Image (spheres, rainbow, N blue to C red):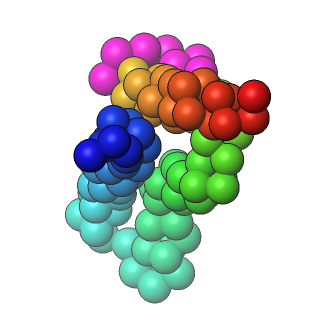
Amino acid sequence: MKNLPKALLLWSARILTILYIIFISMFALDIFSMGLTGWELVVGLFMHLLPSILFILALLIAGRSELAGGIVFLLLGGWFAWRWNEFGWLSAPLFVIAALFLLFWLVYRRKARK
C-alpha cells in the first residue's frame, strides 16, 4: 500500500501514452479508403504510422529513464504544437504525459539519489 501512489503515477503515464498511441494510430486507417494498392498502400500506411512509431520509441525511452522520457515527450508536444499550429486536442496530452514522467522523476527518483 505504501508504493501505491508511486505505481499509480508511473502507470498512469504509461497507460495514457498507450491510449494516445492507439488514438493517433486510428487516423492511419483512412489510408484504406484511398484505393491504393501494393507498395503504395504499404508506404502510405508507414507514413501515417510514423507519429505512433515515434511515441512507441519515446515510451521505451521513458521506460529506461523517466527524466529522458519526460523531456522527449515535452519535445514531441512542442513539435506537434508548432507543426500543426494547434495546442489543444493534439499536443496537450503529450504535455500531460511529459508532466507525469517528470513528476515521477522529481518526486521518486531524485529523492532516491540524495
**x and y percent of residue 4 in the render?**
30, 43
> Relative to 26, is 72 above or below?
above
- Examine the structure image and report whether residue 82 is included in the region drawn in magenta: yes
Q: Residue at x 60, y 48 (%)?
A: 62
Classify residue 25 by image quadrant: bottom left
- Examine the structure image and report whether residue 3 is included in the region drawn in magenta: no
**x and y percent of residue 72 in the render?**
65, 36
Residue 48 appearing in the image: yes
Classify residue 26 by image quadrant: bottom left
Q: Residue at x 34, y 42 (%)?
A: 2
Q: Nearer the viewer, residue 1 or 5?
A: 1
Residue 7 as seen in the image, left or right of residue 110: left
Residue 72 as seen in the image, left or right of residue 35: right
**x and y percent of residue 68 in the render?**
70, 39
Q: Nearer the viewer, residue 50 or 3?
A: 3
Q: Residue at x 75, y 35 (%)?
A: 113
The span shown in magenta is 78-89
Name the magenta segment's main secondary structure: helix
